Image: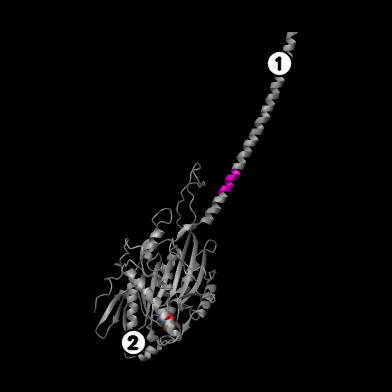
Amino acid sequence: MKPLAPSPTGLTSAPTRPKSASPGSSAVQRRNSTSSQKNGKDDSGVPGRVRVAVRLRPRNTEELAADADFGDCVELLPELKRLKLRKNNWDCETYQFDEVLTETASQKRVYEVVAKPVVESVLEGYNGTVMAYGQTGTGKTFTLGRLGEEDCANRGIMVRALEDILADISFEHDAVTVSYLQLYMESVQDLLTPERDNIAIVEDPKTGDVSLPGATLVELRDQKSFVELLQTGEANRFAANTKLNTESSRSHAILLVNVKRSAKNKQERDFASHSENGNGVHVSKGHRAPTIRKSKLLIVDLAGSERVDKSGSEGHQLEEAKAINLSLTALGKCINALAENSPHIPIRDSKLTRLLRDSFGGTARTSLIITIGPSPRHRGETASTILFGQRAMRVENMVKLKEEFDYKSLCRRLEAELDKLIAENERQAQAILDGEEDMQRKLEEASICVAEAESKFAAASEVSSC
Ligand SMILES: Nc1ncnc2c1ncn2[C@@H]1O[C@H](COP(=O)(O)OP(=O)(O)OP(=O)(O)O)[C@@H](O)[C@H]1O
């Protein structure tokens, strides 16, 4: 048996990206640009390595028949979080993962170990990504996209994630909006409004944040409307009958969930108070700045990573397979570059890598599930999937809270304070005015008294002189 492929544990020794990396590195550029955003504080985030789980699909009917005389190409040791990839009857290679999920692992357990920590983190205000990678027909869509209508135990990660999000937020203060897209032949298309295609990917030059302003954005209030939305999306997704999967996804599907939360009940920062004599508005000590947390959850169901010749594709399907391979190769190159601390990350090589720039080497908490099949006939694909997962485990993100001042709420609060001050000012002015009138009246009374006294005095003087 060979030693473990990456570091002895594969878990703790992932190197961090060098601070001195060249400015050409997009991830490093982004960290630098976000670090100086607010209050001059260093808020570049905390290191958070990409976590990787491996899931084995049970043998399908074809494999049960065709591979009956052969053992599986992998052996899983879930309690040790290890996987053995058989080279032949005598030799195997062992790999360590963050989680090893056997063919009997339930959808609930898969959600809990792979996605739940990311979802919780999104609810706290961090960006998060859950992504499935693997050969065609190994269970990526099963893991992420199953709706579980026939059996609720089959619900996949997308449905369970939204259940948790909708259960945690308050509709009074918070909002959840969803877009559902596919990347097909290097074009971003809207799965909810299919006529919208070639949607532009917009990157904020300051923060590096990626957005898709042309995509349909649906505000969610309940789980039922989310499931309907997924059904619409699935109906519009490109799929084909290939040699490896009768319903093979020919596009990468991307579910984008935006969570906007008022941080009123969460930890809030003290807002610097200004003295009444100082410049700017008066906000008394003890007031807190209203903040808002805007985080994103990306759930990415990649198209299958099969070899073009194995998929049996020709004509248009061959073009599709080439486009899939091109974007997956670009993703692999970025992950390799990040894993090796390369100064240049080729993020611009495909739209997939541009869309995922925050997920790998960025500020998101990322969890990757790699799916594999048991068949020894696909040992090559299984090996390459495992190596992809091993490299991804070495990618270190800088997880960062997506919190900003809630300027609208701050404006409302300041307006109320201003109104109070204006009213108080009017009251005082009126009091002064009232005081002045009183004084005037007294002055006039005094003048009359003086005049009376003077006339009395004059009369008295006249009498005395006679
Ligand atoms: N863990 C599992 N348990 C039972 N059946 C599974 C499991 N994983 C996958 N399957 C079944 O295997 C078949 C292929 O799965 P799926 O379509 O999810 O693969 P995929 O990786 O998304 O393929 P593609 O890349 O071609 O879209 C489906 O019929 C699915 O129900």
Question: Which residue is the site of mark 2?
Answer: 377
Question: Which residue is the site of mark 1?
Answer: 457
Q: Which is nearer the eye, 38 or 347?
A: 347
Q: Is residue 160 above or below residue 59?
A: above
Q: Can you give x and y, in whole percent of width and height, for residue 102 in the image?
A: 36, 79
Q: Please identify the quadrant where the C terminus is shown.
A: top right
Q: Can you give x and y, in whole percent of width and height, for residue 176 in the image?
A: 51, 66
Q: Dividing the image into four equal quarters, which quarter contains ligand 1?
A: bottom left
Q: Earlier in the sequence, mark 2 or mark 1?
A: 2
Q: Is residue 178 above or below residue 455?
A: below
Residue displayed at 73% across by 18% down: 455
- Distance in Å between CA atoms under marks 2 and 1: 131 Å
Q: Which is nearer the eye, 122 or 315?
A: 315
- Crowding at dot 2, Cα within 10 Å, few <14 / some 14-19 / many 20+, comes out as some
Residue 168 in view = no
- Give the structural element (helix, strand or loop) at label 1: helix
Q: Is residue 175 above or below residue 194?
A: above
- Give the structural element (helix, strand or loop) at label 2: helix
Q: Residue furthest top?
A: 466
The residues colored magenta run 417-424
Examine the residues drawn in magenta and state their main secondary structure.
Answer: helix
The quadrant in which residue 26 appears is: bottom left
Q: Please identify the quadrant where the N terminus is shown.
A: bottom left
- Label for residue 266? none
Decide if residue 432 is on the left or right side of residue 13.
right
Nearest to viewer (mark 2 / mark 1): 2
- Crowding at dot 1, Cα within 10 Å, few <14 / some 14-19 / many 20+, comes out as few
Q: Which is nearer the eye, 300 or 61?
A: 300
Q: Can you give x and y, in whole percent of width and height, for residue 410 in the image?
A: 52, 53
Residue displayed at 25% across by 82% down: 91
Q: Respond yes or no on whether mark 2 lies under 8 Å from ligand 1.
A: no
